[in-house]
Each structure stands twice: as structure tokens, then as C-alpha cells.
Image (tube, helix red, strand yellow):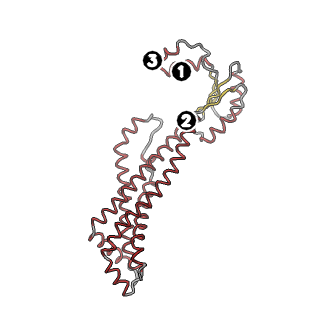
Amino acid sequence: MGLRPFAVVRRALEAMARSPYLALTAVTTIFAAALLTGLFAASLSGGQRLLSAWAGEVRLSVYLAPGADLEQARQAVAALAPGRQVEAVPAAQALARLAEGLGDDARLLSGLGPDALPDAVEVAAPGIALPEARALAARLRAVPGAAEVDFGNAWLERLELFRSRARLLGLALLVLLALGTAVLVSNTLRLAVYARRDEIEIMKLVGATDAFVGAPFALEGLLQGAVGGGLAALALLGLHAALAPRLAAALPPQLPLGRADLLPGALLGALVAGGAAVGLLASGLALLRFLRRP
């Protein structure tokens, strides 16, 4: 018996129509797994976007030791960071900036002298990548009189450590969810296979190949997985539309997070394709026991 595409599609749709509750269970299971995976991936994507935006605002500060020559340090920094905007910031100017930034709380600084903060040389580095920022900071430590070079590296190290661990966790979660979902859906589909076991055995007796018998079930799992993944993608889009105003209000204007930052098209497509793949795997697991019978 040869495979006829239209006949295979018709048999798969008829099977789902005869067992709507089984089909709904499979779709719902894949939907839940795809939604959870999508939420986690959107969080990672948003974190990456914020990190990239922060990198675009990098400003390196070379703090000088007491008695260091500020102008000499500025010239050394300019030589080490060609093409960058370099500014010498005396201690008194740094204290005035801090007071301005504190606003009404500036009175807390009233007891500090003009030399409470060290002289510094600041380098504006918009658009610099984080590895380049680290490399530049390492070079700036050689500036005469430099006591410390800061570009938010302590916070950055913690963030990158979190991001690397989150990636590993996300990969492990994806694998576990895919396998767990495939097993759950395969148990659901196995009920459909069991309900049609007599039909399957008759087709095998008259010479039907495994491909002919299994194709409708495989297509059934594929369609259910694609529908589950597609519904998860739509749910994520709806969730983003509902939360976007609050998210925009919570973030500073220079750090926007649009839909493409959190839910890029590749992620939405991967949810649909991944759901279809899990459904296909689940149907294969469900059929394995029956097709191996002599």
C-alpha cells in the first residue's frame, strides 16, 4: 500500500475528530510546555537587550591616587583611548556632580571637604562592546597615578555570571520539557492507537507497511504539536501587549524593550516548530510498541 498525501491528511483529521478530547489534551500539554519555554526565552532575550543597551552607555572612570597629576593622567588616557571623549574631573567638580545628583539629599554632603572624592579622568565609550570595555579598562590601569579603574565591572560580572547560568538552565529546561512533554503526549496518543489497534492489525495483515500505518498518527502528532506551539506564541504576544505599558513605565526611556527584543520572530517560529517536533516525537513513541509486533 502506497502513501497518498491527501488520504493521509484525511485519515489524521478524521482520527482527531473522532477523539477530540485526546487531541485537546495533547494540544494543551504542548501549549503549556511551549508557553513556559517561551517565557523563559523571552526573559533571557530581554536581559540580553538590557545588557547591550547598558554596554552602549559605558563610561570608564580612572580614579587617581592623592597627589597624582590630573593633566598628565588625562593625556595618558587620551593616548590609550584614541577617538574617545576624555574629560578630567577634579575632586571638587566630582563632589558638585554628586550633590546635584542627590537633589534634596545633597545636605548630607555638607560636612565633606572638597577633596573627599579623588580626582578622576572619565572616558565616554558609547557603543563599545563589553569585552572591549574590559580590555580598555585593563590598558587604563597603566595610567600614571591610577589607583582604580571602574566601569561597573562588579555589577557586570554578577550579571554575566547570572546570564551564563541562565543559559545553561534554559537549555536543560528545554531538553527536560521536550522529553517530558513527548512522553506525556505519547501516552495520550497511545490511547488513540490502542482504540484503533484492530484496524492497525488488519492493515498489517493485508501487507500495509509501517509507513502507511504510522503516517496518519505521525501527522496527527505533528499537527497537534504545531497548534500547541502556535497557541503558545499567540499567548505570549497577547501577554506582551497587555504588559508592554507597565514595562515601558518601569524602564528608563533610554532602555526600551520592544516586542522584537523580547519575542523575536525566530523565537515565535521556534515555538511552533518545536511544538511540531515534540508532537512528531510523541506519535513515534506511541506507535513504536504496535509497529514492532510481528
Q: Which mark is residue 177?
A: none
Give the Cα distance between marks 1 and 3.
Answer: 12 Å
Question: Which quadrant of the rendered structure holds the N terminus?
Answer: bottom left
User: Residue 104 — which label?
Assistant: 3
Depth check, front residue: 92 or 19:
19
Using residue 189 as the reference point, say whether residue 166 is left or right of it: right
Report which residue position mark 2 lands on: 155
- Residue on which the image places disc 1: 98
Please, what is the three-letter code of the amino acid marked with disc 3? Asp
**Splitting the image into 4 quarters, where does residue 16 fall?**
bottom left
Give the mark, 2 or 1, whose residue is nearer the N terminus: 1
143 relative position to 49: left or right = right
Q: Is residue 138 above or below residue 282?
A: above
Q: Secondary structure at mark 2?
A: helix
- Please state the horizontal and vertical placement of residue 225, each as a whole percent of the image: 38, 63
Q: Callout 1 environment at 10 Å: few (<14), some (14 to 19), or many (20+)?
A: some
Q: Earlier in the sequence, mark 1 or mark 3?
A: 1
What type is the residue that disc 1 sits on?
Leu
The number of callouts visible is 3
Disc 3 element: helix
Which percent across, then down, holds residue 38?
42, 52
Answer with left or right where residue 48 lies relative to residue 69.
Answer: left
Quadrant in which the C terminus is drawn: bottom left
